[in-house]
């Protein structure tokens, strides 16, 4: 496999690299993000009320479309945080985290061309094999669709900027072996998705699934030299899970259809993990085919 395009992301990271600088930058990113979340939460409490905001953090709660969009939109704070760190700590243009704006956009669109076929096939498969019920009216769902797409793009772009654009590139810039700059960000990505309060006994499996996804996203990033394909893969996965067919009590406020079980039904969810893993692997292969990499 050729990872030469990865240098497009790594070269800018080398200019101001170093273990201490990287650790400091990552710490500041986390602190800035936490502060911005706290300020945003406080502003919402003042304008909307404590109860509405409290529901956002309640495990197993059923969220409205507005509450789901609020959670997804809060990832814009992570984009701001990593952008400021790259400017102030690493003295570089935040666009360099993407691998260049124009090329990232073109690679994203190219990857999505392949993934549109995957989405169509996946929807047919789900409708033929799964039980579900309609949650939103089609008119409301269609009205929300543009903003749902935008906010999911914000969420997945924020995560890819941090884990692939920043952590992966900085580790590679430090001269770490390939297995390190692929696995470390992926493991951290898995830890981010470890949520026992919401997923109960399924939490370790969810985290492990996220690690596997992180490895695929890291591979796409290194093969293509931008975050475009990884963002496309991430977006497609989350679009299917949050907008098409999701769990009512797990960020399900935007889903047209929901499963007839909840996030606490561990047996049901574990039985679906192999299909989920196969699904994301097939989506990854569709991206590879579209990108010819």
Image (tube, rainbow, N blue to C red):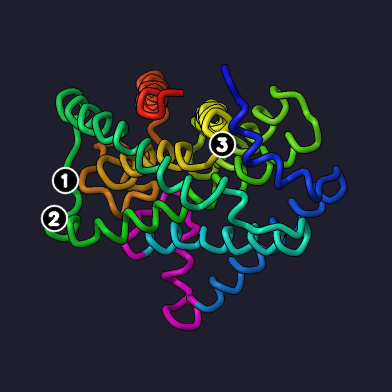
Does the segment drawn in magenta span residue 49? yes
Q: Nearer the viewer, residue 146 or 36?
A: 146
Q: Quadrant of residue 90?
A: bottom right
Q: Nearer the viewer, residue 198 or 68?
A: 68
Does the segment drawn in magenta span residue 184? no
Q: Is the residue 70 above or below the residue 284 in the image?
A: below
Q: CA distance from mark 2 to mark 3?
A: 41 Å
Tag 3: Cα neighbours inside 10 Å, few (<14), some, or many (≥20)?
many
Q: Are marks 1 and 3 in contact (CB under 8 Å)?
A: no
The overriding secondary structure of the stretch rendered in magenta is: helix
- For this view, does 7 lie left or right of residue 274? right
Q: Earlier in the sequence, mark 2 or mark 3?
A: 2
SS class, disc 3: loop
Q: CA distance from mark 1 to mark 3?
A: 40 Å
| Residue 197 image point, x, y percent | 54, 44
Tag 1: Cα neighbours inside 10 Å, few (<14), some, or many (≥20)?
few
Q: Are marks 2 and 3 in contact (CB under 8 Å)?
A: no
SS class, disc 2: loop
- For this view, does 278 lie left or right of residue 184? left
- Label ID, residue 137: 2
Q: Are marks 1 and 2 in contact (CB under 8 Å)?
A: yes
Residue 269 in view, yes or no = no
**Which range is magenta?**
44-66
- Label ID, residue 225: 3
| Residue 180 image point, x, y percent | 72, 27
Tag in front: 1 or 3: 3
Q: Which residue is mark 1?
A: 134
Q: Is the residue 52 above or below the residue 205 in the image?
A: below
């Amino acid at each position: 496999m050729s990872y030469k395009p990865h240098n497009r992301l790594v070269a800018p990271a080398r200019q101001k690299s170093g273990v201490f600088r990287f650790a400091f930058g990552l710490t500041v990113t986390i602190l800035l993000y936490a502060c911005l979340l706290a300020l945003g939460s406080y502003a919402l409490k003042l304008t909307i009320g404590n109860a509405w905001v409290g529901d956002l953090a309640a495990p197993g709660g059923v969220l409205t479309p507005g509450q789901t969009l609020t959670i997804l939109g809060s990832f814009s704070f992570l984009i701001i945080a990593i952008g400021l760190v790259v400017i102030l700590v690493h003295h570089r243009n935040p666009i360099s985290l993407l691998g260049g704006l124009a090329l990232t956009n073109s690679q994203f669109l190219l990857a999505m061309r392949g993934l549109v076929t995957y989405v169509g096939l996946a929807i047919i498969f789900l409708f033929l094999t799964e039980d579900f019920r309609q949650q939103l009216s089609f008119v409301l769902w269609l009205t929300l669709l543009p903003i749902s797409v935008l906010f999911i793009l914000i969420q997945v772009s924020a995560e890819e900027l941090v884990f692939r654009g920043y952590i992966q590139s900085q580790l590679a810039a430090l001269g770490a072996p390939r297995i390190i700059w692929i696995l470390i960000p992926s493991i951290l990505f898995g830890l981010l998705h470890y949520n026992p309060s919401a997923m109960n006994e399924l939490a370790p499996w969810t985290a492990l699934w996220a690690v596997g996804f992180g490895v695929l996203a890291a591979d796409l990033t290194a093969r293509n030299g931008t975050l475009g394909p990884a963002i496309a893969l991430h977006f497609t996965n989350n679009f299917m899970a949050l907008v098409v067919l999701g769990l009512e009590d797990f960020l399900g406020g935007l889903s047209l259809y929901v499963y007839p079980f909840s996030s606490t039904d561990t047996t049901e969810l574990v039985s679906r993990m192999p299909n989920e893993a196969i699904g994301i692997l097939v989506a990854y292969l569709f991206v590879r085919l579209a990108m010819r990499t």
